[in-house]
Amino acid sequence: MKTKTTQSAEARKKPATTKASPAVGTRAIEGGDATPVAHEPPAGVGARLRYVRELHGLSQRELARRSDLNHGTIRCIENETISPSVGSLRKILDSLPITLSEFFSLDPETETKVFFQRDELLEVGAGGISLLQVGHNLKGRPLQVLLERYAPGAETAAQPYSHQGDEGGVVIQGQVEVTVGGVTKVLGPGDGFLFSSRLPHRFRNVGDVEAVVVSANTPPL
């Protein structure tokens, strides 16, 4: 009896086995140690970038090297002390590679929904530009439709940039300076554009009021 009592006491002293949280996993980071990765993507651009970077197993320095940016820039974006332009964010995501649409949805399921209310559009913009996307998950779809809103002075990038695909659209409100392949023109309500995205391009609101554009991209940005 004495032996059994001692064993029972010792058994009671053993710490309970700690179960791993179902919401967190670990992933080896290239250039660093294993880091916990949340299964649910966060909402903020910086926190979401950190989430995606860790899912791809990259350190901040490696992502900076791949995207040809300073390590400090990646760190500041992830800490949300600076907000990247759409062009800068695209440059970072292209080095993974992942599209803007995939970055902001991160949904593996194919979407079958046909109609969308205004509050159901997905925000995929950054840096003073709102890009409301029709549909959340464009996986397998060749087309992306956007409702774009530019604050006065907002621009897609400091310098024109290019990527694969084609894009077109119509200005609904305001004055938008569009540069394509070295040619610049200011477009007003009712004016449109259509060009190969392989040509370096940039959009900038040169007016005093918010500019609104409806556009389409193929494939999705």
Image (tube, helix red, strand yellow):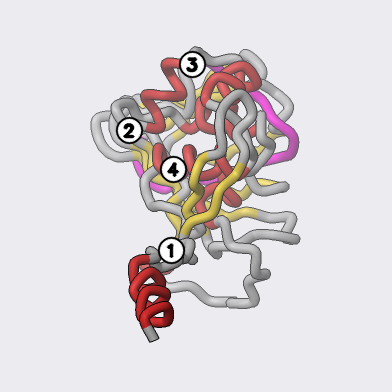
Specify the amino acid type for callout 2: Glu
Find residue 125 and name its label.
Answer: 4
Specify the amino acid type for callout 3: His
Which residue has dot 2 on it? 80
Specify the amino acid type for callout 4: Gly
Which residue has dot 1 on it? 18
* Residue lying at 40% horizontally and 42% vertically, measured from the top left: 47
Residue 168 seen in the current view: no
Choose mark 3 or mark 2, whichever is in front: 3
Q: Distance between the residues labelled 3 and 2?
A: 14 Å
Which residue has dot 3 on it? 71
**Residue at the extreme bottom:** 1
Choose the circle earlier in sequence order: 3 or 1. Answer: 1
Label 4: which secondary element: loop
Label 2: which secondary element: loop
Choose mark 3 or mark 1, whichever is in front: 1
Along the line of sight, which residue is nearer the eye, 212 or 130? 130
Image quadrant occupied by the N terminus: bottom left
With respect to residue 164, does 75 lie above or below? above
Choose mark 4 or mark 3, whichever is in front: 3
Along the line of sight, which residue is nearer the eye, 137 or 68? 68
Image quadrant occupied by the C terminus: top right
- Queried whether the magenta region covers residue 72, the answer comes back as no
x and y percent of residue 92 in the render? 57, 29
Choose the circle earlier in sequence order: 1 or 4. Answer: 1
* Residue lying at 58% horizontally and 50% vertically, measured from the top left: 101
